[in-house]
Amino acid sequence: MRGACAIRRMWDAAMACLRAMTVPTPDPAARAAELRALLQHHAHRYYVLDAPEIPDAEYDRLFQELQAIEAAHPALLTADSPTQRVIGQVLPGLEPVRHTVPMLSIRTETDTTAAGALAFDARVRRELELGEADPPVAYSAELKFDGLAINLRYEEGVLVQAATRGDGETGEDVTHNIRTIGQIPLRLLGEAPPLIEIRGEVYMRRDDFERLNERQREKGGKTFINPRNTAAGAVRQLDSRALADKKLSFFAYGLGDAQGWQRPATHGATLDAIAAFGLPVDAERAVVLGAPGLVAFHERIAARRDALPFDIDGVVYKVDSIALQKRLGFVSREPRWAVAHKYPAQEQVTLLRGIDVQVGRTGKLTPVAKLEPVFVGGTTVSNATLHNLFELRRKGVRVGDRVIVRRAGDVIPEVVGRLPGDRPAYVPNFRMPRACPVCGSRVVREKGGIDHRCSGGLFCPAQRKQALLHFAQRRAMDIEGLGDKLVDQLVEGGLIRTLPELYKLGVAKLAALDRMADKSAANLVAALESSKQTTLARFLYALGIRQVGEATAKDLAKHFGALDRIMDASVEQLLEVNDVGPVVAQSIRTFFEQPHNREVVEQLRAAGVHWDEHAGAAADTSPRPLAGKTLVLTGTLPTLSRDAAKELIEAAGGKVAGSVSKKTHYVVAGEEAGSKLDKARELGVPVLDEAGLRSLLA
Ligand code: IVH
C-alpha cells in the first residue's frame, strides 16, 4: 500500500512539472479578475440570498488564491476586490461628504391606527386632483427599518463611497466600516451604470443583537441598549475593528444620484433593479392599491412584526409612479409622495416600583423589575427582566428611577437602562437574597460565575417540574411514560409536591387526570415500580445536582461505592475522584449540605428506591472480563437497547467507542447495521451478535 502511494505521488509531481512546462501559466490579471467575479457571485449567494452554492472552505480557498495574486502583483489590486473587505482600518476622524442629491426624511404619521393610512391616501388624491371616479393610486408599501440611513455610491459598478445621512446635505464618510458588511456588494452584479447611488438602512438583526449581549453578559461586560443604537454606533466608529463582534445587515430602499441609467418608471421596479444589482431588498415589500391596500399592508405587517428577525418602527408608503412623485413634489424638506406610518414603540420610559427575585426552572435567580404598567411593543408590561445582579449594578438602576423598558419580538421585556435624573436622598442598593425566596434554601454563586442559584434542587417548588423530568429520564431513573405533559398536570394539579411523592401515585389518582386512560395509569405505576431497582450512578445522576452529569455520577459511584459516603464526603475527599474539580466538588457539597435535599434522598430510599452498594473502587472485585477492550455497537440488537448494552460493557470493564478502527476489539452488530459493519469486515475486526456479546460478558 505505502509503496504504491509513494509511486503515485512521484507520478503526480512529474505530471505537474510537465503541465507547468507545456500549459502557459494563466495571466495573473485575468485570473484575478476571474476570482473577483467568482467571489463576488458566491458572496451574494451567501450574504444576500442566503443560498450558498459552495462550502465555506472552497470560498476561503478562492479568497486566498486572490490574496496571493494581489500580494505578488500589487498593481492588480482594485477597490472592489473582496480582499479589501477587511476589518482593521482606523481613521483620525470621519470626513464630511456632501450629498449630490440631498438625503431627505419623510413625514411621520403618528396615528398608529388605520386612520393614518386613510389620511395619507386622501391627501395624495387631493394633491393630484383625483375625483371619486378616478382609479386608486398604486403605492409601494415597505417596512420602516430601524437603523441608520446610508448612501452607497457606485462608480462603474464599484463601491467608492459610503456616507451617513448627517443633516441631509452633508453626511460622514463611513466607507471603511461599510466595507465590512458582507451583504453590501463591493461591485454591483450585472451591467452597472457609470454612476448610481443606492440608499438604504444599516441595521442589526435581533438575534445578532441578542447574541452580542449574551456574550457580553457571559463575560460580565457592558450590554448594548438596542439593535438600532448598536448598529448606528458601530457604523460611525473610527476604528473598524470595533465591528468585528457586531454583525450588521443592510436593506436598500431607494436611489440617490444616478447617471447613464434608464431609471424604471415605478419605485417598485426600481427596487427590483436594485435587487438585481445584488443588494438586499426586503421581501415583505408590496405594490398595493389605494387606501384599502395600505390598511391591509399595515395590518399584515403589524401581525408579523414580532416574527420578523429585525426591529421595525413602522411601515413606509410611497406613491409607486415616479411621474406622479414628480407631480407631487416636496413641502419644505419632505416629499409629499411618501409617509412613514408608525407602530407602537418598542421602548418606553416608566417608573421602577420595586425589584423582585424570580427563581427559574434551573434554580437561577433573576432580578425582575416591577414597573408602573406601560404600553410597549404592543402589550402592557409591568414586569421586565434585569438579567442578573451584575448587569443590574452596571445599569445602576434603583427603585424609584425612571427606566427604559424594551420589548421587541418574542424576547422577554427587559430594563435596558435608566434616565439620568434626581433620586430620593437615600435608596438602598439592591442585594440578592441569601435564601431562596421560594424554598428558603441557601443561595449560592459559583466561583467566577455571574448567576446566583438556589441550592434547593429537588426540594424547591420552582424547580419541581424540571427536577421531575430530569429524574424520570431514561438515563436517570428511567420512568417510562412520565413526560412533559404529565409532569405539568401532576405539578399544576397539586398531585406532586416533592419527588418522593411520585412513588405514592396510585392508579386511581392517575386515571383521574386528563387524557389518562386506566391502562396508561397502570403502565405508569408499573414503570415507577420497576424504576425502584436502579444503580447508585443512575440515582446520583437523577438527583440533578448541578455539575454532576452522567459521567461524573459514574465516577462518584465507582469511587465511593455507597451513597452515604458521598453525602458525607468533604470537598477534599470529593476532589480525589477522577475528573472532579473544585467547582464540581463544591456543588456536590452544597447540595448535600441542604437538609431538604437529604430529606428527599431519605424519603426516596424509604419509598423503596434501591441499588447494590459496594465499598468503593478498592474493594470492587466484580469480574471484569472486558477490561481493556474497546467495542463498537451498530444496528439494533434483539433485546438490549444501546444504553443497556453500553452499561453492561462498561460494567464489565470495557469501553464503547463511536467508530471502528484498527484498535477496535469487537463490533457488536444488530439488525440494519450500516457502514460500521462494513468497516469491521474491511479491517478484519471480529463481529458479534447479541448472544456473542452475552457470552463474552459471562
Ligand atoms: S425612504 C425621501 N424607505 O426612515 C424618502 N426610508 O425619514 C427617503 N427608513 O432615516 C426615505 N425604512 O433611513 C425610506 N423603507 C424605507 C425606510 C426608510 C427606514 C428610514 C430612513 C430615514 C427615515 C425616513
Image: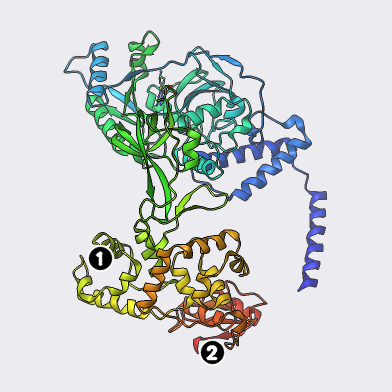
Residue of label 1: 495
Residue 543 visible? The answer is yes
Point out the frontmost of discs 1 and 2.
1
Which label is found at residue 590? Answer: none
Residue of label 2: 692
- Judging depth in this view, the residue of 511 and 545 nearest the camera is 545
- Judging depth in this view, the residue of 531 and 683 nearest the camera is 531
Position of 97 with respect to 357 (left or right) is right
Mark 2 packing: few (<14 Cα in 10 Å), some, or many (20+)? few
Position of 158 with respect to 613 (left or right) is right
Question: Where residue 394 sits in the image (x, y, percent)?
Answer: 50, 35
Q: CA distance from mark 1 to mark 2?
A: 46 Å
- Residue 390 vs 455, above or below: the answer is above
- Residue 474 vs 313, above or below: the answer is below
Q: Quadrant of ligand 1?
A: top left
Question: Where residue 581 sits in the image (x, y, percent)?
Answer: 61, 62
Question: Where residue 459 sits in the image (x, y, percent)?
Answer: 38, 62
Position of 52 with respect to 627 (left or right) is left
Position of 98 with respect to 68 (left or right) is left
Q: Amino acid at mark 2?
A: Gly
Q: Amino acid at mark 1?
A: Leu
- Judging depth in this view, the residue of 251 and 54 nearest the camera is 251
- The answer to which of marks 1 and 2 sits earlier in the sequence is 1
**The residue carrying mark 2 has its beta carbon less than 8 Å from ligand 1:** no
Q: Judging from the image, what secondary structure is the residue with disc 1 in?
A: loop
Q: Which of the 4 quarters of the picture holds residue 382?
A: top left
